[in-house]
Image (cartoon, rainbow, N blue to C red):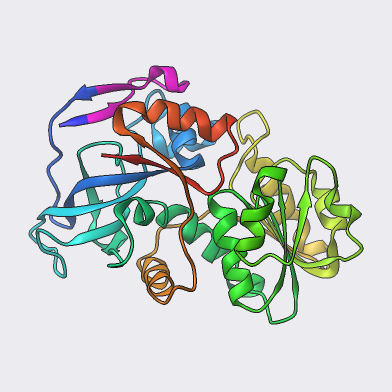
Amino acid sequence: MKAIVQDAYGSEGLLSLRDIGVPVPGDDEVLVEMRAAGVGPEVWHTMTGKPYVARIALGLRRPKNPVRGWDGAGRVEAVGAKVTGFEPGDEVFGNCEGSFAEYARAKADRIVLKPADLTFEQAAALPVSGMTALQALSGTSRPRPGQRVLVIGASGGVGTYAVQLATMYGAEVTGVCGPAGADLVRSLGATHVIDYTREDITDSPHRFDIIVDNAGLRPLPVLRRALTPRGTLVIVGGEGGSGFLGGMSRGLRAVLLSPFTAQNLRNLVSLTRREDLLTLKDLTEKARITPVVDRTYPLAEAPMAIRHLRQGHPLGKLVVTI
């Protein structure tokens, strides 16, 4: 099969399209014939091995799994001996590690049936970004009707879902994005839009009950000034920064500070959960949320997709088609 492979950590220039063997599913796994795969920050992190702390799980010197891609959608080709609930031909989406390939293995509890009305490209845009937004706006950070929610990075993969979810929960949503994303963010339900090239989040006359920060660049004191005295900040991922922890250091500082302030400061590391995939499936089938796909790239151009992710400020999600 053809796959996007890398032998060492580094830039997208180290990625190559190669012919490799088809993976064999374990007893609790499903072999998926991939049709589309999502392109998000998680792909960049596994490609570069940054922040360095991530290499404890990814592989210390080189990637344990040389095939890139983290999530996607496709058709079940074969099922392991202990798998129930799936059969060949089923259309599925979810966590398919090594999804930049014609076939990928997936744990049976990390995929679900694809919503019938979604294309494979739309379904591939849903798992990681959709689950991250869902988990960011859950528990103590789930908005109540009438609360003010600020979504930083509102026009990106996670942000487009966060705006839709917060609006669905009845919040008054303000989105932070560049000028090119303003119309999209308003169309997803945001009442207000802050153009980060011209305004700062602290320029708003309001303070926010919940802030979801997807961008990873603003200092913690700035974010806290935009919060209400008992507001909740959710820092998503580990973008930016340097050193062993990289951008994760900012989230760690927030967690350590949280017990000593009335504000609730959270650092979110999204996890793949079957119940969340089922929730996303239900919400899309009921047209409560809609995946936003900026553009698609053929498998051979996956390195270009990753480059666009880092440099092009995509509106919504980028997708590789197989």
Measuring 28% from the left and 63% from the top, which residue is drawn there? 114
For residue 258, above or below residue 7? below
Residue 123, how many percent across, how many down? 35, 57
In this view, the residue farthest toward the top is: 13
- Which of these two is toward me, 45 or 289? 289
For residue 248, above or below residue 312? below
- Which of these two is toward me, 12 or 270? 12
The number of numbered discs placed on residues in the rendered structure image is 0
For residue 159, above or below residue 273? above
State the quadrant of the N terminus. top left
Residue 225, how many percent across, how many down? 88, 56
For residue 76, above or below residue 8? below
Residue 32 sits inside the magenta stretch:
no
Measuring 31% from the left and 56% from the top, which residue is drawn there? 119
Left or right of 247 on screen, residue 219: right
Q: Where, by quadrant of the figure, is residue 240 drawn? A: top right
In this view, the residue farthest toward the bottom is: 145
State the quadrant of the C terminus. top left
Does the rendering let one see residue 17?
yes
Residue 12 sits inside the magenta stretch:
yes
Q: What's the magenta region? A: 3-17
Residue 32, how many percent across, how many down? 19, 50
- Which of these two is toward me, 180 or 128? 180
Does the rendering let one see residue 178?
no
Left or right of 183 on screen, residue 308: left
Measuring 32% from the left and 49% from the top, which residue is drawn there? 72
Measuring 25% from the left and 46% from the top, which residue is drawn there? 35
Left or right of 104 on screen, residue 302: right
Residue 197, how many percent across, how many down? 79, 40
